[in-house]
Amino acid sequence: MRQTEFGMPGRGQRGVSLLGLLFWGVLLAFTGVVLARVFPTVLEFYTIQKTVDRIAAANPATVPAVRADFEKAQQVEYSITSINSKDLVISKENDKLQISFAYDKQIELGGPVYLLIKYEGRSR
């Protein structure tokens, strides 16, 4: 074991180099930018899901009534922009109304690079 001038066992230098610090800083910044762009789309999905669940629980009598209820909710919930009432798939299963939806969201990350997220959901 190597000893220092004071007679204590010595250790090599420890810590992060400047290049390592730069690498981790760039990685954290990129991750933060991606999360900041993805988060609003996740919130929109949960808003759509909540709206569809509420409409299905009310059990409207006709398909146009379901679409009208969704359009009313869309006017109130300004965050629903990815789909409209025509994108809803409405069916009956065991005398229970089922509303399903699916859509894609493209998020530009820079230049020709995009992140594609495919959302789909159905009423509970």
Image (cartoon, rainbow, N blue to C red):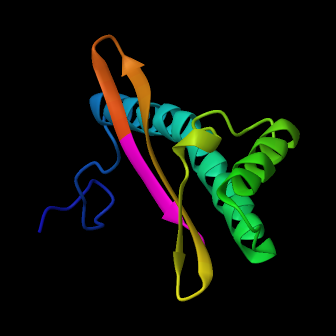
In which image quadrant can residue 85 be found?
A: top right
Foreground residue among 114 and 91? 91
**Residue at 38% of width from left, 47% of height from top?**
118
Q: Is residue 124 above or below residue 53?
A: below
Q: Please say whether residue 12 is one of the residues in the magenta stretch.
A: no
In which image quadrant can residue 72 be found?
A: top right
**Residue at 59% of width from left, 44% of height from top?**
39
Foreground residue among 9 and 95? 95
Outermost residue to the front: 62
Residue 101 horizontal/vertical position (percent): 50, 54
Residue 30 horizontal/vertical position (percent): 42, 31
Q: In the visual, does 107 lie left or right of 15?
A: right
Outermost residue to the left: 1
Outermost residue to the right: 76
**Residue at 25% of width from left, 67% of height from top?**
9
Q: Is residue 105 above or below residue 8?
A: above
Q: Main secondary structure of the magenta part?
A: strand
Foreground residue among 68 and 32? 68
**Residue at 72% of width from left, 56% of height from top?**
66
Residue 88 horizontal/vertical position (percent): 55, 51
Q: Is residue 112 above or below residue 94?
A: above
* Quarter of the figure that contains the C terminus: bottom right
Outermost residue to the top: 111
Can residue 124 be seen at all in this image of the molecule? no
Q: Which residues are magenta?
A: 117-124
Q: Is residue 91 above or below residue 66?
A: below
Q: Please say whether residue 123 is one of the residues in the magenta stretch.
A: yes
Q: In the visual, does 16 lie left or right of 101?
A: left
Residue 79 horizontal/vertical position (percent): 74, 38
Can residue 116 be seen at all in this image of the molecule? yes
Q: In the visual, does 43 lie left or right of 29?
A: right
* Quarter of the figure that contains the N terminus: bottom left
